[in-house]
Amino acid sequence: MEIIAAYGTVFLILAVIFGLYMTWGVGANDLANAMGTSVGAGAVTVKQAIAIAIIFEFLGAVLAGGHVTDTIRKGIIDPSGIADTPEILVYGMLASLLASAIWLMIASAKGWPVSTTHSIIGAIIGFAIVALGPEAVKWQKVGGVVMSWLISPLVGGTISFLLVMSTRKLIFDTDNPLKNAKRYAPVYIFLVGFIISLVTLFKGLEHLHLNLTTLQSFAVATGIGLLTGFIGWMFIRGIKDDPTANKSFSYASVEKVFTPMMLFTACSMAFAHGSNDVANGIGPLAAVFSIVTSGGEVMQKSTLPVWILLLGGFGIVLGLVTFGFRVMQTIGKRITELTPSRGFCAELGAAITVVIASRTGLPVSTTHILVGAVLGVGLARGIGALDLRVVLNIIVSWLVTLPAGAGMAMIIFFTLKGIFG
């Protein structure tokens, strides 16, 4: 308690700096892969992606980011052993933030789309092992995280594969692809609005006190989906057949229908990312803020002031602007060649998987889901459509994320303990 009283302000300043660095990494890696499909498919430019991200990432973080976050992310460790020594948890949270941020910077520089959730979990496991002992780690939960490496891409890939097949059957392999594209496009756009609304209603908005039942959530999501579908129809109804463009690519006019559709998925992915993943960057910051302002009380959940959510939103957008292009290239161009229709199927497949996961409690990563969705889209054209070397590099980066975060967090924890202890 004396250490908290003596260095409380220093701990808060360090938490803000490390939290900003971590959210910068989330933007450079996590948000970049959420926007990568839209950029890679040519539906939006990098500048447009950044503009969309600034607006919808902030809206997602502040409106639906949740004003309460788990102090110990995902309940991965048992903090009961440090109730009398809150400074240990402060060192651990600071070490976890800095370790995760460093790993995300390394991964982003290499263009690897890694999971920010797994990065912070790995860091917290590392600090817990050295501060509390291996028995403080809930290894069963860690097993669930490891299982998600297989589950996430498999489910996301399967759904995206089926969506590509549906566009082939209903649109591309018909006598009049453009007419059918304009006929079915509002249905697909309805699905975007419906699915993203469900994600938000299921996972966020607690602080707005919208305690909707499952049935009410479905009703609201249906209404938003219908509105989105109508707006989408207004966008695409004027698209005409372009014989000149069709000479170089026979489905050029049809792909023009999917370009505005991808604007909807780009906005939706940015909003969903802000609402779901902002806590990865600011959860530990909120924990330090809670301990310092309460005079050393360790709580399982801590209130998130709006300034912390705004800081998280700012850091994430800054990361995308300054460093996100590398991961965007990997997701959008290097795994497989994306067109607007394929990119749309990948993002919609990823969104559907997030909804399934949020309702069933499957321990999944949005990054792994999206990579799996892009793989599923590529596989619909055959294994030759995938760059297997890039895929292998991504899988290796996933496997390294947990131990890399853990190892760095251990070193940083002992450094902080030596400085302040």
Image (cartoon, rainbow, N blue to C red):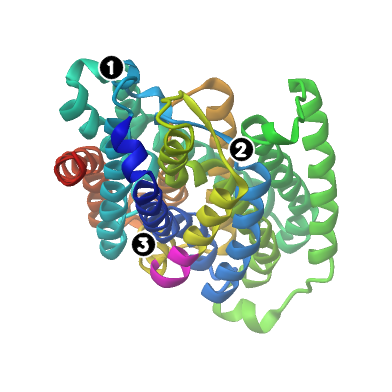
Q: Residues within 10 Å of mark 3 (few under 14, many from 20)?
A: many
Q: Quadrant of the C terminus?
A: top left
Depth-wise, is mark 3 or mark 1 nearer the camera? Answer: 1
Mark 3 and mark 1 residues within 8 Å of each other at the beta carbon: no
* Residue 307 x, y percent position in the rendering: 58, 52
Q: Residue at x 33, y 48 (%)?
A: 114
Residue assigned mark 1: 81
Q: Residue at x 79, y 51 (%)?
A: 228
Q: Residue at x 85, y 49 (%)?
A: 227
Q: Visible in this render: residue 157? A: no
- The magenta-colored residue range is 318-323
Location of residue 209 with respect to 51 vertically, above or below: above
Q: Marks 3/1: CA distance?
A: 42 Å
Q: Residues within 10 Å of mark 2 (few under 14, many from 20)?
A: many
* Residue 233 x, y percent position in the rendering: 83, 58
Residue 66 is tagged as 2
Residue 330 is tagged as 3
Query: 303 or 247: nearer the eye?
Result: 303
